[in-house]
């Protein structure tokens, strides 16, 4: 049922440990022909998988969940070696994956199965049902920062919805992709050789080939720039896409917030995983009354962090070498633009590690405020009140997640933020709740993974309206009487024309 493509290919590439440069494994660079062949095989897989009962799919996915739970440390070790993150951070990532498999497997039938909908007075002789059927073959293009959690947000929900999947992991984390695909084979078996979950590896070209290989949907996670390319390629064949791009998530700290908790959340949300988190905190807007105390707390916590290569480190290296330059350029832009550093500075960037940087008073049009930094850099700006904070938080082009620390106005402020998800008095918590849909607006993309929306994302809605009995008057017929439409309007005036 699961198949890793044997390499009839010209070249290979190596996956490295970013902490040491050690070669961890070698993987084929799959060509456009290889990818097309994988998608063709996936067609059979999709037919087989969609042909199982919902209960059979559920039981196979729950077996996969058990395998993931039993072998969690093994997967965490692969994640840790390819990303450089400490083992416990990788373990945390795996626990989230397991929870999503559990929820998607158990809820797919309930969310997607056929349900009756109300038919209304005019069509009282009909019965209407709506069902969500799998789209067929889904291509998933994954990133390197959470190489298990992020692609699995699409893979698991697409599988639970009855699709076959072809996964193209980032060139930096192919080993995690392979581990996931092979682990699916363990509980599911492949009696008829119909591949339900396959792996293709390579560089950007392999991902591009997946977009044009005849898949029925593409789920992409990565940069906004590449997302536009993916969408343009998919537009050629009207292939739908779900795009989970970057973010520039903001935290609002109101005057009555628990400052200790807010500072802890800002530092963890901004700097864990070296800040390489799409829903990581990058901007903090703090009301004037508590600004100075908040900055003191944040600075103390950030200074205590120790990035490094060991599992005891606060966080690991930058996984993608070129990201170091992006981080450096944002810190420099902030300092040249009038911002000041209370923790670290340009010298904090010492590849492959970046020490914590906390910047204050950075102009809102500065690169460090407008563009995704994807490093352990926190911009803390003072605002007069929480309303100004909302305005500034909504000022950018991204709109993925956000966080609000406040007592009286927490929910109200959260409701005014132009993002997909908001955590009130916590950070990132929404990603750990399987039932909460995940995705953004604006430059952060569109479509949703996770939860019921995440299951429906990988389906097509299929409605059936069946006539239960014939009415004496025919509405939809050339035989309808001359006065029928007028009578209908009069009846509707009576029932629908009232003000309430
Ligand atoms: P990309 O957007 O370039 O890569 C994401 C995925 O897309 C990778 O699997 C990549 O393959 C693949 N890809 C690259 N080019 C194409 C293409 N033309 N068609 C289809 N797929 C393609 O991100 P980067 O890894 O270069 O990171 C750049 C920036 O993106 C980061 O600085 C960060 O700001 C943001 N980012 C956001 C993430 C998020 O979680 N939202 C995750 C990762 C990055 P390959 O790796 O083999 O090139």
Image: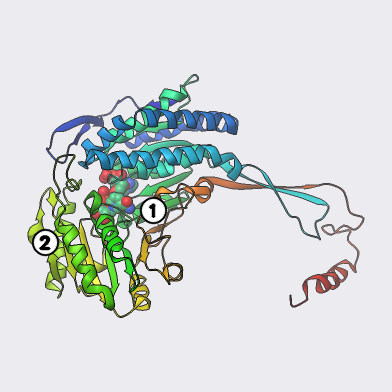
On the question of residue 215 being in view, the answer is no
Q: Position of residue 203 (x, y in %)?
A: 26, 41
Residue 222 lies, with reference to residue 342, above or below; the image says above
Q: Nearer the viewer, residue 361 or 193?
A: 361
Mark identifier at residue 429: 1
Marks 2 and 1, how far apart in space?
28 Å
Coloration of the structure image: rainbow
Question: Is 461 displayed left or right of 425 in the figure?
Answer: right
Residue drawn at (81%, 60%), measured in percent from left and top? 122
The furthest residue to the bottom: 384
Q: Secondary structure at mark 1?
A: helix
Q: Secondary structure at mark 2?
A: loop
Kindly indicate the quadrant of the structure image that contains residue 302. Answer: bottom left
Question: Is 482 displayed left or right of 409 in the figure?
Answer: right
Residue drawn at (44%, 71%), measured in percent from left and top? 416
In which quadrant is the N terminus drawn? top left
Q: Which residue is mark 2?
A: 344
Q: Position of residue 238 (x, y in %)?
A: 48, 51
Kindly indicate the quadrant of the structure image that contains residue 12. Answer: top left
Residue drawn at (88%, 50%), measured in percent from left and top? 470
């Amino acid at each position: 049922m699961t198949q890793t493509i044997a390499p009839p290919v010209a070249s290979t590439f190596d996956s490295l440990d970013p902490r040491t440069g050690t070669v961890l494994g070698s993987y084929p660079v799959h060509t456009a022909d290889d990818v097309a062949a994988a998608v063709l095989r996936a067609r059979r897989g999709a037919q087989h998988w969609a042909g199982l009962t919902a209960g059979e799919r559920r039981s196979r996915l729950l077996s996969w969940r058990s395998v993931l739970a039993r072998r969690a440390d093994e997967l965490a070790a692969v994640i840790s070696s390819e990303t450089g993150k400490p083992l416990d951070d990788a373990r945390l990532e795996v626990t989230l994956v397991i929870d999503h498999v559990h929820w998607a497997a158990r809820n797919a039938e309930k969310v997607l199965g056929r349900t009756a909908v109300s038919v209304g007075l005019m069509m009282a002789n009909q019965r209407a049902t709506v069902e969500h059927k799998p789209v067929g073959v889904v291509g998933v293009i994954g990133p390197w920062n959470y190489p298990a959690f992020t692609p699995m947000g699409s893979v698991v929900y697409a599988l639970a919805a009855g699709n076959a999947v072809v996964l193209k992991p980032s060139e930096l984390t192919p080993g995690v992709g392979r581990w996931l695909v092979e682990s699916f084979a363990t509980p599911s078996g492949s009696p008829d050789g119909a591949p339900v979950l396959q792996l293709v590896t390579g560089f950007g070209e392999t991902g591009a080939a997946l977009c044009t290989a005849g898949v029925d949907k593409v789920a992409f996670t990565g940069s906004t720039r590449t997302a536009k390319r993916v969408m343009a390629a998919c537009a050629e064949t009207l292939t739908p896409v779900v795009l989970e791009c970057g973010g520039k998530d903001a935290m609002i700290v109101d005057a009555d917030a628990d400052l200790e908790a807010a500072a802890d959340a800002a530092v963890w949300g901004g700097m864990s995983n070296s800040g390489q988190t799409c829903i990581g905190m990058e901007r903090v807007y703090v009301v004037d009354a508590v600004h100075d105390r908040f900055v003191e707390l944040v600075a103390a916590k950030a200074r205590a962090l120790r990035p490094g290569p060991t599992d005891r480190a606060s966080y690991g290296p930058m996984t993608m070498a070129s990201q170091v330059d992006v981080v450096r350029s944002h810190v420099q832009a902030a300092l040249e633009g009038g911002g000041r550093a209370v923790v670290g500075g340009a010298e904090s960037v010492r590849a492959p590690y970046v020490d914590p940087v906390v910047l204050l008073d950075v102009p809102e049009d500065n690169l460090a405020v407008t563009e995704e930094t994807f490093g352990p850099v926190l911009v803390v700006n003072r605002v007069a009140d929480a309303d100004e904070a909302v305005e500034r938080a909504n000022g950018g082009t991204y709109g993925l997640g956000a966080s609000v620390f406040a007592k009286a106005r927490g929910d109200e402020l959260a409701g005014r933020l132009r993002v997909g998800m908001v955590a009130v008095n916590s950070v990132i918590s929404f990603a750990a709740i399987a039932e909460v849909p995940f995705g953004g607006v604006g430059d952060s993309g569109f479509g949703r993974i996770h939860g019921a929306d995440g299951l429906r994302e990988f389906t097509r809605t299929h409605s059936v309206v069946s006539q239960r009995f014939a009415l004496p008057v025919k509405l939809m017929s050339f035989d309808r009487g001359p006065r029928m439409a007028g009578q209908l309007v009069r009846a509707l005036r009576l029932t629908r024309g009232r003000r309430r």
